[in-house]
Image (cartoon, rainbow, N blue to C red):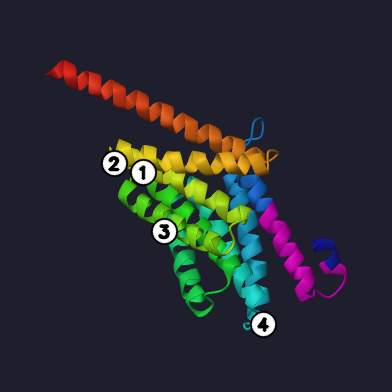
Amino acid sequence: MERIEKQWPATPESRRTAMLALSSLGMALAAESPGLPAEPDQAIMAFHRGMSVATAIRDKDPNNALAVEDLMMMRSHLGAALAVSHPAEGIAALESARDEILTYSGRHPDDFNIQKTLTDVYNDLGQTQRLSHRPELALQQHLAALKLADRILADSPADGISGKARVIALIRAANDELDLGRLPPALARLDLAQKDLSKMVRSTPADASLSELTAEAGRIRAEAQKNFAKNSSESRLSH
């Protein structure tokens, strides 16, 4: 796309294709998989470039709803990438993206695409707050993600993206509860997550991310029960 733009005048379509390519590149660089570690700084650079392109498209046509949504999407991706290596900057960027999307959603309440982006922002912001040792704030964001995902699923029960966002919110909220020393609500949220995951795996067994989430939920449950048993034993011994 960059070569094309050097040879021919850029169009909104070609610019958007370049922006989407930069978004995909950033997400690939931010992801971590066996044998391929994440490259957060490179991801941030890709998202910054994507933001520049998205901003140029929006500025050329401020009434273009798709351009406005693309810019908010890129801002949320950038915030999530920043959160990995620059937590304070990540929180600030994600909070800015959240507030901007909330304002936009208030004017466009039926725009489910931007609401899905907002669900991801809530989940990313909650995770960053948790890693910054703020479990109460983290729980607030994860519960907001859960509430929004439930609202989308009420209208579109088969929406796999929102179904996965709901599971992520439940698992992360369980972690927040554990950080706050609350085992019963944590296990209740894990029960809901594992129930949802069982249904989703049956319908889309080839989705590797569902297997990863299932393993994560099981690991958190096992560690929580182990720690609870250990603490209970120590408490009995101390008395």
In the foreground, 165 or 201: 201
Residue 190 forms part of the magenta stretch:
no
Residue type at mark 1 is Asp
Q: Secondary structure at mark 4?
A: loop
Neighbour class for label 2 at 10 Å: few (<14), some, many (≥20)?
A: some
Residue under circle 3?
144
- How many angstroms separate mark 1 from mark 2 (CA)? 6 Å
Q: Is residue 149 above or below residue 86?
A: below
Of the image marks 1 and 3, the number of the one nearer the N terminus:
3
Q: Is residue 107 left or right of residue 54?
A: left
Q: Are marks 1 and 2 in contact (CB under 8 Å)?
A: yes
Q: Find disc 2 in the rendering and name its residue.
A: 180
Q: Residue at x 56, y 74 (%)?
A: 110
How far apart are the alpha carbons under marks 1 and 4?
Answer: 42 Å
User: Which SS type dominates the magenta stretch?
Assistant: helix
Nearer to the camera, 36 or 123: 123
Q: Earlier in the sequence, mark 1 or mark 4?
A: 4
Report if the CB atoms under discs 1 and 3 are less than 8 Å apart. Answer: no
**Cα–Cα span, label 4 and label 3:** 32 Å
Does residue 58 appear to the left or right of 15 in the view shown? left
Q: Nearer the viewer, mark 1 or mark 4?
A: 1
In reply to whether residue 11 is colored magenta, the answer given is: yes
Q: Secondary structure at mark 1?
A: helix
Q: Is residue 124 above or below residue 95?
A: above
- Which residue is denoted by mark 4 in the rendering? 61
Which residue type does callout 3 highlight?
Ala
Q: Nearer the viewer, residue 2 or 139?
A: 139
Q: Amino acid at mark 4?
A: Asp
- Label 3 environment density (alpha carbons within 10 Å; few <14, some 14–19, many ≥20): some
Q: Position of residue 90 (x, y in %)?
A: 47, 55
Location of mark 1 (residue):
176
